[in-house]
Amino acid sequence: MDAHFEYVLRLADDQLVLGHRISEWCGHAPMLEEDLALPNIALDLIGQARMLYTHAGEIEGNGRNEDQLAYLRPEQEYRNLLIVERENGDFAHTMLRLFFYASFMELFWEKMLTSSDEVLAGIAAKAIKEVRYHVRHSAEWVIRMGDGTDESARRLEDAYDDLEAYCTEMFEMDDVARDMVAAGIGPDTQALVESWKAKVEAIFREAMLNRFAPVEGHRSGGRKGQHGEEMGFLLADLQYMQRTYPGLNW
Amino acid sequence: MSETVKNEVPLWEVFIRPRNGLSHKHCGSVHAADEVMALQAARDVYTRRGEGQSIWVVRSKDIVASDPQDKEELFEPTADKIYRHPTFYEIPDEVGHM
Amino acid sequence: MYSQGLIGADTSTEESEEFLRAFQERIDAEQKIEPNDVMPAGYRKTLIRQIGQHAHSEIVGMLPEGNWITRAPTLKRKAALLAKVQDEGGHGLYLYSAAETLGVSREQMTEELHAGKAKYSSIFNYPTLTWADIGTIGWLVDGAAIMNQIPLCRCSFGPYARAMIRVCKEESFHQRQGYEIVMTLAKGSPEQKAMAQESLDRWWWPVLMMFGPHDSDSQHGDQSMRWKIKRFSNDELRQKFVDATIPQAEYLGLTVPDPDLKWNPEKNDGRGGYDFGAIDWDEFWRVVKGKGIMNRERIRDRRKAWDDGEWVREAALAHAQKRAERMAAEQQAAE
């Protein structure tokens, strides 16, 4: 597979899958205000995914549109990070995951502003504004939960323990990513680790959460299509219509 | 008002400036535990269609309102002071717009 | 979306005739009533009940459509549906806020809903079984709601009227997105067209019930009309809805499941309108009283969201208090 195509597809899958997860909260949030906040975030991510899929389809040049890419691949051709496909869990798990991921993406999109791929640079310019709000919103909740009640602090710690294995994958470099660095298209994500750590730990301090930024996780494989058991169920929902009624317009 | 329910998340009034040059206008309320949360909730609830350039939030309980019962003494005394209005004065048409 | 004819309001009021007459004069003069104004207890009660039911309908209404967010067939449809369901949450929020100006809290209203004491639109006790239902709900359920809600923009109670203006403005896309979904199906494969027709068959009668009982059976309609909380009767609105909707169905090549449906040129003062068959009011009351297909699940889901969220709300309050105390201490130290 062409590295450029693969690279954009990975990014698209990340945003779609996390947007999909967050959209599951709509109608079930802890308070009505959050029933509005979470869909705003999901809509941002789905919007980013749409632009990225369209761009990936153009790079590929086989006439595949956003929906064909988003809906019609077998599980192992989805290349998203494992952290975004994890089930939502409770509100602490959802918010801490978003905080980890959005804090990474804020750094990532900043670098992407100067990508030699002008379409990606354009998407970055839009996405950076959105993701800054995601960081702000999730960080505030991390602080509130960490420095709230005993129960909320315990739940935040549980969420940390569940998620810590998955953060390292965000920074991993492989041949595709290295090709993109060489072509001036994408950043060296290893170089983002320190800034990410600093941001995460600053918020942890405010949240009175006695933990370090998790940078030694052992779970990875999403970029190669090796997903967790939950991914199949996510795709069963996502692809249900397209698989049951192939080839129709909706 | 509602002592029966414990731990209510407080109510805030939301004011939005649609664009620079206009004043902030009351547009509704949100529930939030603190001012940071209130601002974010106001943004997420009341500016989903690009309605705002600036947001104010204020605790509903901090608003001091006049009593509608006092309406007569507060507002009616101005009704007969018609000399405050330009149409009270007669200026011939020949003078032109003034 | 989704106001329904008010169910079971108590409009009784005990003020002096002189007071009620003065109030009625204000209403007749089209003066808006604002929250701190004096008002008859019956007016306040009716509004709390009606706005509360309306708000609950929006919130419960998020569930049947939300059921399809993760299964929407394209990214465009997914984004539109998510935005629409989110809007409904927003509308619930505006309406709770309007009710709160009358001295009842959102928490109180929520607890009444969860205890089964407050009503919401019976339409949401029907399940969404196919993707076509998402189209049908937008087209018909939102369409019916718009019929109800546009006159509410002129309701005599200021906060309710203002909330409705906002709701109607935002909602203009809801019915169109629904109709577009159904249109895509109706013009699609035979399978898709059958899906659209089957959906219309299931939803048509429950949608007509959304306008509430016939005027002759509606106990509190008259007082609500006098107080200008309501501007049109249930039957008037239902007729307007049928007259507006039948041509839309014909355009799609879909058939409304009513053998008695017939154009009547005499109707609507000679402008013509549709006669339609008898509504099964037994079904309506069964659903209102809790025996609909989804009543239990809807309340169970709402209660679960609320109960699961309790620790989150408590954390937010606890943190707000700590932060306030810290700020106060810092200020003291500085002085």
Image (cartoon, coloured by chain):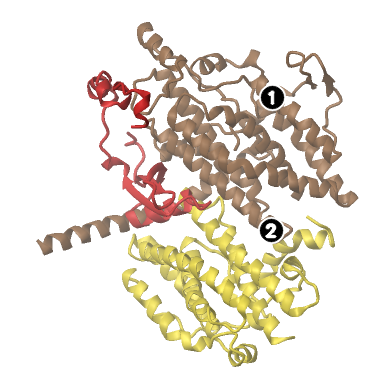
Chain colours: A yellow, B red, C brown
Indicate the chain on which mark 2 is placed.
C
Q: Amino acid at mark 1?
A: Arg
Q: Nearer the viewer, residue C78 or A95?
A: C78
Can you name the residue that lies furthest to the left here?
C335
Disc 2: which residue: C76
Instruction: Tell me the element at label 1.
Output: helix
How far across and down, in percent of the image, does residue A147 sit?
33, 64
How far across and down, in percent of the image, does residue B60 sit?
32, 42
Asked if labels 1 and 2 share a chain, the reply is: yes
Indicate the chain on which mark 1 is placed.
C
Q: In what quadrant of the picture does the N terminus of chain C appear?
A: top right
Q: Is residue C179 above or below residue C327?
A: above
At label 2, counting other C-alpha atoms closer than 10 Å, the crowd grade (few under 14, some 14-19, many 20 or more) is: some
Can you name the residue that lies furthest to the right here?
C190
How far across and down, in percent of the image, does residue C36 sit?
33, 27
In which quadrant of the rendered view does residue C77 lie? bottom right
Q: Nearer the viewer, residue C332 or B20?
A: B20
Q: Amino acid at mark 2?
A: Lys
Label 1, label 2: how many angstroms apart (C-alpha)?
32 Å
Task: Give the residue at x 83% y 31%.
Answer: C257
Can you name the residue that lies furthest to the front here?
B94
Q: Is residue C190 left or right of residue A68?
A: right
Instruction: Tell me the element at label 2.
Output: helix
Residue A211, numbered label = none
Disc 1: which residue: C238
Q: In what quadrant of the picture does the C terminus of chain C appear?
A: bottom left
Q: Is residue C129 visible?
A: no
In which quadrant of the rendered view does residue A230 lie? bottom right
Q: Is residue A218 above or below residue B71?
A: below
Q: Nearer the viewer, residue C175 or A165?
A: C175
